[in-house]
Amino acid sequence: MKIIMEKAQRFLYKNNLKYELIDFEKEIVRFIGQMELGLKSNDGLPMVPTYVSGNLYPRQGGKTIAVDVGGTYLRVALLEREDLTTRIIDMVKEPSMGKEAPVTFNVFIDDLASKIEPFLQYSKIISFSFSHEIIHSNTMDGQVSFISKEISMTDYENRLLADSLKQVIKKRTNMDVNVVLINDTVGVAGSMLQHGDEFQNYFGVIMGTGTNACYVEQCKNIKKINDAKSETMFINVESGAYVPLIVSDIDRAFDATTLLPNTAILEKMVSGEYFGRLYYFLIQMACKEGLFSDKFTLNLKSHEPLDTKDLSEFYKNQSSGAYAEMCDDQEDLQLLYFFASCLIKRAAVLISIKIIAIARKIYKQNEAPICVIVEGSTFYGLKGFQAMVQKFVETNKKDMNLQLYSVENAALIGIGNIGLAFDAETSF
């Protein structure tokens, strides 16, 4: 086993897959630099202006409809705010359209309207979160610029999302509604609006089907626009587009197999949509190097591709799941676990770098902490991942006071808060 593990270590080093090779400080400085570049130009990170004010006050006693179009699920919910708390009253949850088969924009919008209709008797305010990249406008509408997370949608070019939804609802119900268009990461950040006075600042991070981040920026720093209506604005970082200093040959080869190669590089290294598939791809490459037994290699070749759920199950319990069933000896099991552990630790490092970089950009030296709200099935579902991130953040944050928070249904609560603020006629 010692000889095999030595070969495995050489395999990782040769392919730049060891997380120890990542220079935290260089990546943090680079990430901040890419953020700054994206605020003033179309280079660097996308840094999408959302036109959602950073000063929001959800209306007490109000109700709103929250729509969360994610990479895996569509959620439509009715929310209300009482006693300074926003809660979900009712919710519909279904698989996202375009995952199993391509969907047209018109079919998507019509289906979405049908899910919203039952809730219109309670509210005509719809806070519409779309988890793909959008070009926003100061009218709280926007057009899709990029569809990610392996969703296939056609005919969305030059179509306004909020206006299209309003028109379809009007046609179906003869009702006039107000729709505010946001991104789901804005929603995650917005889940802490009721606690805003406890912190000097806050931002949201998602690590689920995809990965992203959102924070509040001073509008004077957003040089690429000149039509902001508020002093501060939520910025959708689109952090999945970040390209780390070290991207291995295996990452590049895997990227070439995805629906849209040469895009969303960080997302394909860490997020749930891709992570398990990347691991499966890595194991295939290791088999070609002769690291696994002939029996396991044959079993893997004849098995259908595995995903993040399969990886998560094996990492949690090495005696169950598809990977375990393909192993006849302990060496293969140990090698599978070793590679899983290395890839998961690398993902934890990359997510920690993103958190520290955003925090460092906005941190001010005072007694109040920065609140980081993290949501996502991959972040909380992978065994030990949350603790890994917390450890890496704590070790590398220097003198910053950061607190990582988990809010149940953070995206939906935050989407609802923004809808309630819109209902209160807050300036966006």
Image (cartoon, rainbow, N blue to C red):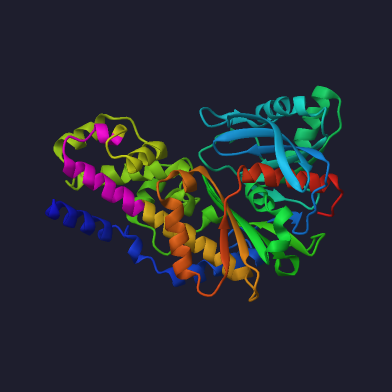
Side of 351 relative to 420 (left or right): left
Picture layout, residue 298 above or below residue 31 = above
Q: Quadrant of the C terminus?
A: bottom right
Look at the image and tell me whether residue 143 can be seen.
Answer: no
Query: Which region of the structure is painted magenta?
Result: 323-343
Residue 70 figure quarter: top right
Report if residue 331 lies within the magenta region. yes
Task: Give the overall secondary structure of the magenta segment.
Answer: helix
Query: Where does residue 316 sit, x and y in percent of width and height?
Result: 35, 42
Report if residue 100 lies within the magenta region. no
The residue positioned 48% from the left and 46% from the top of the image is 380
Residue 215 figure quarter: bottom right
Residue 302 figure quarter: top left
The residue most toward the front is 83
The residue positioned 67% from the left and 64% from the top of the image is 201
The residue positioned 41% from the left and 47% from the top of the image is 255
Towards the viewer: 140 or 82:
82
Look at the image and tell me whether residue 345 can be seen.
Answer: yes
Picture layout, residue 4 above or below residue 320 = below
Towards the viewer: 147 or 302:
302
Query: Where does residue 385 sit, x and y in percent of width and height?
Result: 43, 51
Query: Where does residue 274 sit, x and y in percent of width and height?
Result: 44, 43
The residue positioned 28% from the left and 36% from the top of the image is 323
Picture layout, residue 357 above or below residue 366 = above
Query: Where does residue 100 sit, x and y in percent of width and height?
Result: 51, 28
